[in-house]
Structure formats: structure tokens, C-alpha cells
Image (spheres, rainbow, N blue to C red):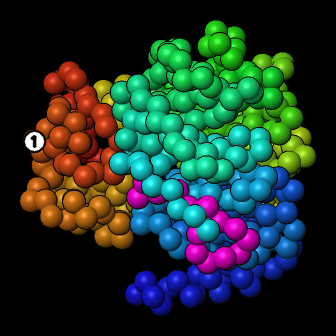
């Protein structure tokens, strides 16, 4: 079936009309977006394991790139670099022009690559991984610097002016690494971190799972906290001039934030549930969003208005109906990757609809790791509770799932009792 679908997907995106402002072609949520320095092209990565190179002026796809084994989680562009993609398979691919194969492949991570960043001149690329490390690779001589310290998945990375580096992790720490390899500065925050960007003046912005955007000095001193919503922020972007931040999350809303004034000045409503990726065009007047609806949408970053056809408004919080139920509160940490109903389908992880009584690695349409396919586990309330008691890496080695545990036994029980009720 896959060999038949791939040409059809390519045909569909190539014949998209020139006037289209919604870029269509991915078969899964759009996980990552990057725009070229000249603003003429963009590259997107998806849970469907493909990357697409787009001609933004024509609104069409120039190439569909299939190299990675697993979701394409990160894309970055840079002068002289072209584009680079990072994926679930732990590899980084460098792409030149419209070539169908990578110009170079970087390996070394032992877990999924979650984020990429480059220096302004494109001479170095940094990669953040769920293996708990950050790798900084010189594209001039191939030397690699490995930064260790995070206790769990690293979800964001960005270069500081002057050559330093910042990383943001699921362990709720922001780490500032000096250019000379000295000891890093660690800032511990109240919630896991899902992304980080750095402004031209060195100010650091991090997106948190508690719906807050937090700003820090280049030395890690807290400067401001902006409440964007109540659900996790999972997408973050900064305009090239550093004036505007964009933060998006699970409910499909994107806040455009005036960085200088420390306030939300506009909200984009309806760009897909959840919003997985954001990228400004170089002039800062337009922004692209990628979401679970498989589309890339174009927005006026000044007014917050959608460019082109009108889009549906953001849906309601699906967990709002369970307000006050402890199991639903515990599940909020899982909602970015898992859905509960058959109509919502798979995200980064498989749908949990019908999970109890289901064998591991058997949800239709989900690309499981090879390790999962060899396991002999049936999901019950007991096995799900055990998963969160000892952690995915211990209970299901080789998993794509980020490492996390639920400490209190009563919270694990509340979660499985609630899942039993809502996943039938």
C-alpha cells in the first residue's frame, strides 16, 4: 500500500494551485517547519516520516523527501546550509536544493532528535535528543562536542550570541552552556520544557508544559512570565528581528507576543489541534503554522488574521468535561501525544481508544519501533500502571515514548481507572 500512496501524495502536493495559502501534502501532523533565509522556500517535517520542500511564492511542493525511519521532528535552515532534518531514528540529514537524497548524514544520537539549531553563519549545527544529550557538530571539520547533564529527553536547543548554547528539557531545566566548554548554568523551572529560542540581544524564551512562556537573561536570570494558556505549549518561534514571539499549544491557539512589552498582542485561532510547529518568514510579517490537521497555514503576523480561506475556530478542551477528576489531570501530560477516541486517530503516539485488552504494537496505522513488535505485553490496568511506575525505558526498552514516571500509586490508579472509563 505504501508504494502506491507515496506517488499519489507527491502528485497531490505538486498540483496544488498557485494561489493556495494552505500547504497540503503530509499524511500526518506537521511536526516541524523552517523557512529559508531568503523566504522563498520552506521545509516541513511530519509524523508521516517525510519532509517536504515547499516553494512559498508558488504555494507548491518542490520535493517530497523520504529518508528517515520515523517521525521527522525537527527542521532548521541556515545560510550555506540549506535545510537539515532531525528525526525519530536519531539521524540528521542535510539537504541541498531539490535533491532526493541527503548531501550529508550526521549520526551519533541514541534516541530521537527533537530539535535543531544553527549558528548565524551556518557553520555549526546543534541537535537536542531524547537520549538526554545535545550534540554540537562543526560542518567545516566534522568535530563533535557532546553536552550531557539533562536527566531525560532534551526538547529544545538554541545558540547564544557569542557561541554559547542553551537547551531545554523534559526534566524542567534550562541549561546554559558556555562556548569554551565550562560548567553549565542550570535553571530549574516548575514544569517540563518543550522549546527554547534566543533573541538577537541574547534574551532566552522557553515554552513550558504548564502553558507559561518564561523569559531569561543570557545568564539565566528570570525576567518575565507570560501566561499563554492552561495546556502545554509545544511550539515556539521568534521573528528574525527578535520583536515577536509565537507560542502554540494543544488547543490549537497561537499567541503572538510583543517581546518588548511582555504582552500578547494577537491570537491566531484555528491552526490545527494541536499546533506542533511555527516559523516566521524573514520579514516577520507572516508566520507559518503546522498542526494535527496535516496542513501548513499562512498567517499575517501583524494582525493575526489567516491569509486565504477562513479556518475553523479552535476546538474545546477535550478534558474540560472531566474537570476535577484526578485521572484526567494526570493524563494532561500525555494529551500531546495520545488521543482517546477513534475519530482523532494517532499522533506522536498511538490512539488509546480500546487500549485495554489490546496487544502492544497493534493499534492500526501507527509506525511502532521494531523493539515493540517483539514484545509480549497485553495492555491492562496493571500493565499500564507498571509502565508508569518503573518508566518506559525499563518496562518497554526501545520505546519511542519519552521517559517519565508517575510516583504516587494513587495517581497511577486514578489514571488507569479514568482511562478505562474514557477509552471504551
Q: Is residue 127 magenta?
A: no
Main SS category, magenta section: loop
- Image coordinates of residue 49 in percent, x first then y, are 48, 66
Residue at (69%, 17%) from the top-left corner?
A: 218
Q: Is residue 99 magenta?
A: yes
Say which of 342 and 98 sits in front. Answer: 98
Of all residues, the one furthest to the front in this rendering is 141
- Image coordinates of residue 387 in percent, x first then y, are 18, 40
**Neighbours of disc 1 within 10 Å: few (<14), some (14-19), many (20+):** few
Rendered view: 333 above or below 271: above
Residue at (72%, 56%) from the top-left corner?
A: 81
Residue at (13%, 38%) from the top-left corner?
A: 386
396 sits left or right of 72 in the view: left
Q: Secondary structure at mark 1?
A: helix
Of all residues, the one furthest to the bottom in this rendering is 4
Question: Is residue 27 something one can see in this rendering?
Answer: no
The residue where tag 1 is placed is 382
Rendered view: 112 above or below 170: below
Which stretch appears magenta? 89-102
Say which of 77 and 290 sits in front. Answer: 77
Q: Where, quadrant-wise, is the N terminus in this rendering?
A: bottom left
Residue at (66%, 76%) from the top-left corner?
A: 99
Please identify the quarter of the rendering in which residue 158 is found. Answer: top right
- Image coordinates of residue 364 in percent, x first then y, are 31, 70
- Image coordinates of residue 340 in percent, x first then y, are 36, 52
Amino acid at each position: 500500500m505504501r508504494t502506491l500512496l507515496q506517488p499519489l501524495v507527491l502528485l497531490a502536493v505538486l498540483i496544488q494551485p498557485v494561489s493556495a495559502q494552505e500547504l497540503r501534502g503530509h499524511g500526518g501532523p506537521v511536526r516541524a517547519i523552517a523557512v529559508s533565509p531568503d523566504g522563498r522556500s520552506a521545509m516541513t517535517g511530519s509524523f508521516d516520516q517525510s519532509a517536504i520542500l515547499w516553494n512559498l511564492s508558488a504555494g507548491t511542493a518542490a520535493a517530497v523527501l523520504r529518508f528517515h525511519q520515523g517521525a521527522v521532528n525537527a527542521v532548521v535552515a541556515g545560510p550555506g546550509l540549506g535545510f537539515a532534518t532531525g528525526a525519530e531514528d536519531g539521524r540528521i540529514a542535510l539537504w541541498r536544493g531539490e535533491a532526493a537524497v541527503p548531501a550529508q548524514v550526521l549520526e551519533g544520537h541514541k534516541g530521537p532528535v527533537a530539535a535543531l539549531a544553527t549558528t548565524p553563519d551556518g557553520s555549526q549545527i546543534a541537535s537536542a535528543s531524547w537520549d538526554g544529550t545535545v550534540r554540537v557538530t562543526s560542518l567545516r571539520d566534522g568535530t563533535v562536542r557532546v553536552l550531557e547533564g539533562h536527566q531525560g529527553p532534551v526538547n529544545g536547543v538554541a545558540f547564544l550570541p557569542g557561541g554559547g548554547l542553551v537547551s531545554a528539557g523534559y526534566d524542567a531545566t534550562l541549561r546554559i552552556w558556555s562556548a569554551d566548554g565550562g560548567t553549565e548554568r542550570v535553571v530549574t523551572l516548575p514544569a517540563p520544557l518543550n522549546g527554547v529560542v534566543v533573541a538577537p540581544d541574547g534574551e532566552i524564551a522557553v515554552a513550558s508544559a504548564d502553558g507559561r512562556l518564561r523569559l531569561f537573561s543570557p545568564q539565566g536570570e528570570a525576567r518575565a512570565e507570560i501566561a499563554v494558556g492552561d495546556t502545554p505549549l509545544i511550539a515556539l518561534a521568534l521573528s528574525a528581528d527578535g520583536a515577536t514571539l509565537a507560542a502554540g499549544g494543544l488547543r490549537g491557539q497561537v499567541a503572538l507576543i510583543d517581546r518588548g512589552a511582555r504582552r500578547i498582542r494577537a491570537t491566531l485561532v484555528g491552526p490545527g489541534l494541536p499546533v506542533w510547529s511555527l516559523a516566521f518568514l524573514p520579514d516577520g510579517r507572516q508566520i507559518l503554522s503546522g498542526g494535527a490537521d496535516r496542513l501548513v497555514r499562512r498567517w499575517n503576523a501583524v494582525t493575526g488574521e489567516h491569509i486565504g480561506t477562513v479556518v475553523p475556530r479552535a476546538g474545546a478542551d477535550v478534558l474540560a468535561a472531566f474537570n476535577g477528576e484526578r485521572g484526567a489531570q494526570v493524563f494532561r501530560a500525555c494529551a500531546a501525544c495520545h488521543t482517546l477516541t477513534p475519530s482523532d486517530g494517532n499522533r506522536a503516539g498511538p490512539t488509546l481508544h480500546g487500549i485495554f485488552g489490546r496487544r502492544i504494537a497493534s493499534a492500526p496505522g501507527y509506525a511502532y519501533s521494531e523493539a515493540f513488535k517483539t514484545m509480549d505485553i497485553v495492555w491492562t490496568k496493571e500493565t499500564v500502571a507498571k509502565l508508569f511506575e518503573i518508566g518506559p525505558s525499563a518496562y518497554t526498552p526501545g520505546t519511542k515514548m519519552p521517559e517519565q514516571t508517575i510516583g504516587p500509586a494513587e495517581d497511577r490508579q486514578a489514571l488507569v481507572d479514568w482511562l478505562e472509563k474514557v477509552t471504551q
